[in-house]
Image (cartoon, rainbow, N blue to C red):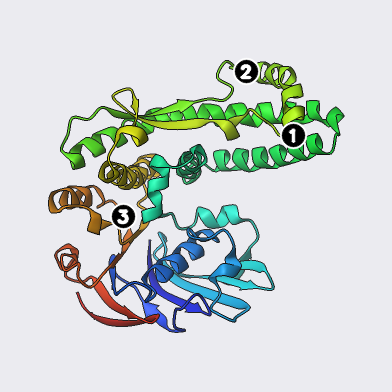
């Protein structure tokens, strides 16, 4: 699957031009603030209906505008050209695939698998536990629709249970406890299984690129650690109910689980250098690619946003050798990063990006 054309209207600073992207590699070259990352954001928003930079679609509007439209043409696995359109107007998002409206975002996210590499990914390593939960939940949701459904149901139940606690409707809590136990246990089992499989990929990748024998791994710590059945979880929720009422929130559950990156029995974020943490965040994304391919046999589209500059030549070459498993890749580079030319295949597309416009030349 590859995109063949992207068009953005009233989206960030991008010009209203149809940009041909019908190659496996697309390079966007330009100084900061010209629109390189905005273009990657447009692609990601088409793929998932949301941005990797903002939780609010209204923030993606061009200055002074009240609506935007994204259009992407892509060659599907069926060999046919499809058209994906996302419209945002009156604070509402609408998505159309070949002129048919997609009502459930779930259908959209399994249409074009997409992985973005950005500076913010370092939060997966040294950020709050919520950031690592988000990474692994995203990783599992990419290939497992049942996990995605369970997560969606659990979040809704959690919201309803917390509201019942705050409003003093405590007689409803046993009902929510039963449902949270059901979906929470299923999620807990999937997370445990996925981390065990992910640990077969990530550590070896990190050792290869860092050229070290570092013992590094992901550990999964369950909030309901002593519970192995739905009945165990319900019993635990009953025992801790008064604590929840006092705290005015649900204090245990899979939304409190922790994923920890450990190096030689120490917390990696506390003992690793900034360079090591940054490298680990890049390797997490690369492992996510490999994990997705292992699970589905499919290759994702990747968006690589100004992250290679921080790697020295040796690490960069090893890292790029691990990144080959993509269907299509979009890279952003600053003009001084001349090494991009050595990465480009003969038929790669290269664009100079200036004030949201794209000037193409041969790669």
Residue ID for mark 2 = 229
Looking at marks 3 and 2 on the same chain, the residue that comes earlier in the sequence is marked by: 2
Q: CA distance from mark 3 to mark 2?
A: 39 Å
Q: Secondary structure at mark 3?
A: loop
Residue ID for mark 1 = 248
Residue 199, position as x, y percentages in the image? 34, 31
Q: Quick one: 361 or 266, which is closer to the camera?
A: 266
* Disc number placed over residue 326 in the picture, else none: 3
Residue 336, position as x, y percentages in the image? 19, 70
Q: Does residue 10 lie above or below 296 as drawn? A: below
Q: Does residue 263 lie above or below 160 as drawn? A: above
Count of marks, rendered view: 3
Q: Secondary structure at mark 1?
A: loop
Q: Is residue 47 left or right of residue 228?
A: left
**At x 24% / y 55%, what residue is drawn?**
310
Q: CA distance from mark 2 to mark 1?
A: 26 Å
Q: Does residue 341 lie above or below 218 as drawn? A: below
Image quadrant where one finds the C terminus = bottom left
Q: Is residue 93 left or right of residue 336?
A: right
- Please identify, in this view, whether the residue under mark 2 or under mark 1 is nearer the observer: 1
């Amino acid at each position: 699957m590859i995109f063949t054309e992207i068009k953005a209207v009233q989206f960030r600073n991008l010009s209203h031009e149809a940009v041909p992207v019908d190659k496996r590699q697309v390079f966007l070259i330009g100084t900061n603030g010209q629109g390189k990352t905005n273009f990657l954001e447009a692609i990601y928003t088409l793929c998932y209906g949301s941005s990797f930079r903002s939780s609010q679609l209204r923030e993606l509007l061009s200055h002074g505008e009240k609506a935007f439209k994204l259009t992407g043409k892509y060659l599907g696995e069926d060999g046919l050209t499809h058209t994906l359109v996302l419209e945002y107007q009156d604070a509402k998002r609408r998505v159309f695939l070949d002129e048919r409206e997609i009502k459930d975002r779930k259908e959209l996210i399994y249409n074009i698998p997409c992985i973005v590499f950005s500076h913010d990914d370092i939060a997966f390593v040294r950020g709050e536990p919520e950031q690592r939960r988000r990474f692994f939940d995203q990783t599992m949701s990419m290939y497992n629709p049942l996990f995605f459904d369970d997560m969606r149901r659990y979040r809704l139940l959690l919201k309803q249970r917390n509201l019942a606690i705050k409003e003093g409707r405590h007689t409803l809590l046993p009902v929510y406890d039963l449902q949270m136990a059901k979906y929470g246990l299923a999620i807990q089992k999937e997370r445990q299984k996925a981390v065990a499989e992910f640990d077969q990929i990530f550590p070896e990748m990190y050792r290869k690129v860092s050229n070290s024998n570092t013992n590094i791994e992901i550990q999964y710590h369950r909030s309901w650690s002593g519970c192995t059945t739905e009945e165990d979880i319900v019993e635990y929720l009953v025992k801790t109910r008064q604590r929840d009422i006092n705290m005015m929130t649900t204090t245990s559950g899979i939304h409190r689980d922790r994923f920890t990156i450990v190096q030689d029995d120490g917390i990696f974020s506390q003992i690793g250098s900034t360079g090591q943490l940054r490298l680990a965040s890049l390797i997490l994304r690369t492992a996510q690619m490999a994990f997705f391919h292992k699970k589905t046999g499919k290759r994702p589209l990747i968006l690589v946003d100004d992250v290679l500059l921080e790697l020295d030549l040796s690490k960069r070459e090893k890292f790029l050798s691990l990144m080959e498993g993509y269907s299509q890749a979009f890279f952003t580079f600053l003009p001084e990063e001349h090494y991009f030319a050595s990465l480009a295949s003969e038929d790669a597309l290269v664009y100079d990006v200036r004030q949201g416009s794209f000037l193409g030349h041969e790669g």
